[in-house]
Structure formats: C-alpha cells, structure tokens
Image (spheres, rainbow, N blue to C red):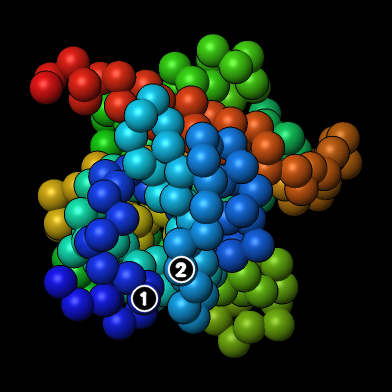
Amino acid sequence: MEKQYHVGFDDSHGAKYVILPGDPGRVEKIAAHLDNPRFFCRNREYTTWLGELSGKTVMVMSTGMGGPSTAIGVEELYLTGIRDFIRVGTCGGMALPVTGGDIVIATGAIRMEGTTKEYVPIEFPAVANLDIINALVEAGKKLEFKLHTGIVQCKDSFYGQHNPDRMPSGFELKDKWSAWLKAGCLASEMESSTLFIVCQILGARAGCVLNVVWNQERERIGLSNPHCHDTENAIKTAVEAVKILISQDNGFV
C-alpha cells in the first residue's frame, strides 16, 4: 500500500497493537519499555517507534493534542493494520478522591468536543472496549498503583476549562462543569472520546489510561493537591496491559 498521507508510513510495520501518547516527546520514553525499540517514522505531529512485547510487534505513536489529529492518526493507523489502541496521557482530576499521581482508567468519556459530532450524533456514547478496560485494570492492580475507573470529560479548549470567566460562553462552560462534577466525572482530558468513537466506527478496540497531574477542585476547596507530571506509572500500566492482551489473543490462535 502507499504511505498514509499524515502518519507517513504504510502497512510494512506488522503491528496490531499501538500505544498512543499525545506528546511526540514521550514516544521514545514509552518505546524504551519495549524489547528492541527503534525509531520508525516522523511526520507532522506523528512520531512513531516500534518494538516487541511477548514476541509481537508493538507500535508507539504520538497523536498531538485534541480530537482532530487523534482522529486522523487513528483512521490511518487502522488502514495500516492496527486493531488495538491504548491512549496513555495526562489529565486533571475532578472528583475529590482523584489526586496527583493516581491512575485513571477511562470506561467512557463525555463528548464535549467537536470531532466526533462529524462521526455520529451526540446521543451515541463514547465508551472504551471492555477487553482493554479489563486488561488495564488487571495491569494496574498487578503493579499496585492507586487507580480509578469511570467517566472522564473530553474537551477541546484547555483554557476554556481553566479560565472560563474570560470566555463569552463561560456561563455554559461553568454550568456544564458543575453538572459533570455532580455526576461523578473523574477527570478532564482532550483525546479519549475521539479515540473511543473512531475505534467504535472502525470496529477496533480502544482504551485509555491517564496520569493525574493535579486536581483543581481539591485546590479550590483547600484540600492537599499534590502535582505529578511523571507519566511512568501510566506507561507501565499500558505496557503491561498490552502483554495481557497479547496473551489473551494468542489463546485464540
């Protein structure tokens, strides 16, 4: 096949599994957890490395920030043969028990972004694949990380969240934020719902594991609010989950 226009490669990689950070600078760090890590391609926001786990080729590719670049990357990865997608990213905590350094495994996402509205009407839910959720939970428990499972909010505007009073639509942003809190939303990030919806439409499996950087709601009411920018635990959880998925898939061969 021809090289895909945006990601910059064809189906010669031979991988079925991909780990997806947003940040291109995090790709090599994740690939270092694989056997025989090697650079594969770099084009636009998509930096790609390959390696192996349990004898299978595994890809690591950045998506950039937000829904549009995530959707393009996932679409083109699928065309090259990827079928299992695990996002590794960061988030801001919302529910009070969620603190910096914790792990959040998203079971579903609030579609407060624009990309997926061009795939399916807003009433259709953005949910992760159950096999991948279970693999991530099993991995996190095996590694003895503090983890939470549940719904996250997926947005397009970082500064709309952090400075809503400056925005002409700030009244709506604040009302919806209050609603998400009352409904028990765990955290906020920017790519999960796009990943879930695009994979649902394609017939692929998707999951998402996030490092909690901090929690603005804990800070707002004066609770302790540790900050953690180290994504190592989320990365280890994703890598271990891929091993579990490979083992499960091999059982069906």
Q: Compute the Cα span from label 2 to label 1.
A: 7 Å
Could you tell me which residue is drawn at 60 percent across and 17 percent down?
143
Q: Amino acid at mark 1?
A: Gly
What secondary structure is found at the residue carrying circle 1? loop
- Work out which quarter of the rendered image holds the C terminus and state it: top left
Residue tagged by mark 1?
8
Q: Which image quadrant is residue 171 in?
A: bottom right
Above or below, 8 relative to 75: below
Q: Amino acid at mark 2?
A: Cys
What secondary structure is found at the residue carrying circle 2? strand
Residue tagged by mark 2?
41
Q: Is residue 79 left or right of residue 136?
A: left
Residue 148 visible, this angle? no
Mark 2 or mark 1: which comes first in sequence?
Answer: 1
Q: Is residue 59 left or right of residue 26?
A: left
Q: Is residue 247 left or right of residue 232?
A: left
Could you tell me which residue is drawn at 58 percent across and 31 percent down?
236
Residue 1 visible, this angle? yes
Could you tell me which residue is drawn at 19 percent across and 69 percent down?
119
- Work out which quarter of the rendered image holds the N terminus and state it: bottom left
Q: Nearer the viewer, residue 69 or 242?
A: 242
Which residue occupies the extreme bottom position in the image?
168
Q: Nearer the viewer, residue 183 or 250?
A: 250
Q: Position of residue 40 (x, y in %)?
A: 45, 62
Q: Position of residue 249 (x, y in %)?
A: 21, 25
Q: Is residue 120 left or right of residue 126?
A: left
Could you tell me which residue is drawn at 54 percent across and 15 percent down?
141
Q: Position of residue 37 (x, y in %)?
A: 53, 46
